[in-house]
Image (cartoon, rainbow, N blue to C red):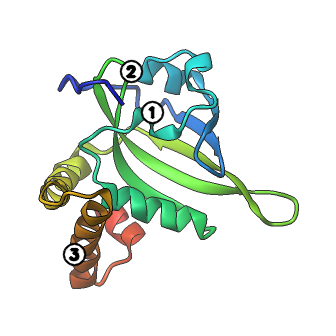
């Protein structure tokens, strides 16, 4: 990822839904017009690319680990995510990610629908993500970064006696 974040936030309509689908390895197989518009890509630029093409460096790795662990286990997840457009602008979403199952019940890919996030919820999410990122930035390796932020996230959830989805919906 060679794009530098601009610090400029992009917005989309509350009635709009960003949709993408991936194969099992996270490569984009479908992106709707809203996805393409807000991310600033043409369809040919994203299909076949890893979904991480829109990963913003301010998105904690520990949250992505939780997301991937959840969907790879066959469950759905809701999460607040900051993504990065092709030009470096960012946009926040409230994501609902689900596995897609084949005829034999096996996971064949993933489907994500993203809505406009609650600004009140983001006021609570941003400080948490800042804390997770600070822990990640103290570590050298990607594995240690993930471990550091995952530890903080799981401890925070345990202190509140909440599952991640319960926490997200409590915001």
Q: Residue 31 — which label?
A: none
Q: Calculate the distance from the C-alpha at mark 3 to the C-alpha at mark 1.
A: 29 Å
Q: Image point 51% across, 27% down: which residue? A: 35
Q: Tell me residue 98's x, y (percent).
A: 60, 56
- The residue nearer to you, when weighing 147 against 32, is 147
- The residue nearer to you, when weighing 164 against 50, is 50
Labels 2 and 1 touching (C-beta < 8 A): no
Q: Secondary structure at mark 2?
A: loop
Which quadrant, please, contains the N terminus?
A: top left
The quarter holding residue 152 reads bottom left
Q: Secondary structure at mark 3?
A: helix
Q: Tell me residue 25's x, y (percent).
A: 61, 49
Q: Earlier in the sequence, mark 2 or mark 1?
A: 1
Residue with the mark numbered 2 = 86
**Taking 53 as reference, is 132 above or below it?**
below
Q: Earlier in the sequence, mark 3 or mark 1?
A: 1
Residue with the mark numbered 1 = 53
Q: Image point 15% across, 62% down: which residue? A: 135
Q: Image point 29% across, 84% down: which residue? A: 161
Q: Residue 156 — which label?
A: 3
Please indicate whether residue 38 sits to the left or right of residue 158 in the image: right
The quarter holding residue 131 reads bottom left
Q: Earlier in the sequence, mark 3 or mark 2?
A: 2
**Taking 55 as reference, is 133 above or below it?**
below
Disc 2 crowd, CA 10 A, few/some/many (<14, 14-19, 20+)? some
Q: Secondary structure at mark 1?
A: helix
């Amino acid at each position: 990822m060679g794009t530098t974040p601009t610090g400029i936030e992009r917005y989309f309509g509350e009635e709009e839904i960003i949709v993408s689908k991936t194969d099992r390895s996270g490569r984009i197989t479908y992106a709707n017009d809203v996805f393409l518009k807000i991310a600033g890509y043409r369809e040919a630029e994203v299909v076949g690319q890893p979904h991480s093409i829109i990963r913003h460096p301010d998105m904690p790795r520990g949250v992505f680990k939780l997301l991937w662990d959840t969907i790879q286990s066959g469950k759905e997840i809701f999460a607040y995510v900051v993504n990065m457009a092709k030009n470096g602008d960012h946009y926040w979403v409230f994501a609902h990610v689900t596995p897609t199952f084949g005829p034999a019940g096996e996971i064949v890919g993933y489907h994500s629908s993203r809505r406009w996030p609650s600004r009140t919820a983001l006021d609570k999410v941003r400080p948490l993500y800042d804390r997770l990122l600070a822990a990640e930035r103290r570590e050298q390796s990607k594995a240690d970064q993930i471990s550091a932020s995952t530890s903080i996230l799981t401890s925070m959830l345990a202190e509140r006696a909440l599952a991640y989805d319960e926490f997200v919906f409590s915001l």
